[in-house]
Image (cartoon, rainbow, N blue to C red):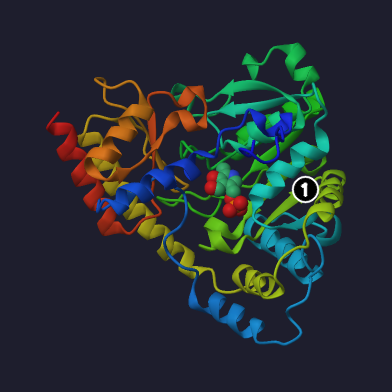
Amino acid sequence: MLKNELLIEPAQRIASFKPYFFASLAKTIGELKEKGVDVIRIDMGSPDLPPEDFIIDKLAQAAKNKNAHGYTANGGTPAFRQAIAAYYKKRFDVTLDPATETLGLIGSKEGLFHLTQVLINPGDLVIVPDPGYPVYSASTKIAGGEIYTLPLRAENNFLPDFSEIPQPVAQKAKLLWINYPNNPTGATADLAFFESVVEFAQNNQILIAHDAPYVDICYDGYIAPSILQVAGAEKVCIEFNSLSKTYNMAGWRIGMAVGNKEVIKLIHTYKSQLDSSHFGPILEAGITAMEGDQTWLAKRNQVYETRRDIVVKGLLAAGFQLDIPPAAIYVWAKLPPSYSDSFSFCADLLNETGVSTTPGDVYGTMGKGYIRISLGTDTSRIEEAMERLLGWINNK
Ligand SMILES: Cc1ncc(COP(=O)(O)O)c(C=O)c1O
């Protein structure tokens, strides 16, 4: 591995992995910028707007406390876990026991990964949606599990069709991932769908992992539900949520797992072997975010909605096919008929116009022929990106 030094073979669990797509993309973008290209990034789902001032003020004020710099309780302080339970009560009318049914995470991504590690032995089966957030399948591969891919199709509003799952698969699978509002498609699910998921889990003894970081970014009056609103869901479901997108706090690394007690306990046990939890002032500011004024979220969502409309208009004019997303921060669009390969489309678009988008294949084979555009970039830059894209397509 290291030339002329130690020859160390990587462990099998990582050997087949390529670097995370966005890490490679950042390298390419860095090279373009060095050449003077004005790159507009509408690829990554990182909110460009900051949290409201009262949240940042809380962090600054808490950081001044001389006693606030030591380790904090693993999985979040009792006060943070209580704030999670209070948020779930207020937002979804779901009652959670803070000590056993909530867990603070260093961003929800680690929790998704840990869940797989605590449940899946080599050979165990996991049902993963395609397209889907790559961590569901990556964490399964690292655990040595097997993946059954569940396609999300445009004609079914990007919801899975459980009747497609063969009975032996449903009986063998230990874990099923779902994610609504959905990344990358922007699709949403209603309570009736969640009821059918819970029933599927009960009938087949499968744990449902619902990944819900976009639950508070909704448009056109839509309000996204939590799967825990379904009666009995806490027995068969765990839900992941995050302050990253809801409160524009992606870089702060603060999220949560809620639901099934036994699974929360397993993740907590696993996690406490690996990390030493959050910086206390971040937890305090997180509590302030969840307990404080929520009215700014509607204004923030209005900004995303305006951007969504700009992207939708631009893409439709350029010949893409899409459904207008009612939630999340992405527009998922099928390439115009004269193109088929999203990787080469995105690479050419980036190299020739400086506009960086994400090829759909990054989210699975069903993403072939699609691109994903993120709304987490300044509105005027999104406008410019759409102008560049339209001009480029029209000149082809
Ligand atoms: C579907 C989905 N789940 C989980 C995450 C992880 O979010 P975080 O770790 O910032 O809470 C993301 C981030 O983009 C996501 O899109």
| Vertical relation: 360 (above or below) 83 | above
Q: Position of residue 272 (x, y in %)?
A: 83, 55
Q: Position of residue 383 (x, y in %)?
A: 24, 52
Mark 1 Cβ and ligand 1 under 8 Å apart: no
Q: Is residue 165 left or right of residue 103?
A: left
Q: Nearer the viewer, residue 72 or 240?
A: 72
At x 70% / y 39%, what residue is drawn? 6
| Residue 75 in sight here | yes
In the drawing, does residue 328 fall left or right of residue 169?
Answer: left
Q: Is residue 70 above or below residue 250?
A: below
Residue 112 image point, x, y percent: 69, 43
Q: Is residue 369 left or right of residue 148?
A: left
279 above or below 391? below
Count all numbered tags in the image, as a single digit.
1
Q: Amino acid at mark 1?
A: Gly
Q: Tag 1: Cα neighbours inside 10 Å, few (<14), some, or many (≥20)?
A: many
Asked which secondary structure carries label 1, the reply is strand
Q: Residue 341's spot in the image, x, y percent?
A: 35, 23
Name the residue located 42 percent from the left edge and 64 percent from the top edge: 49
Which residue is located at x 27 percent, y 37 percent? 349
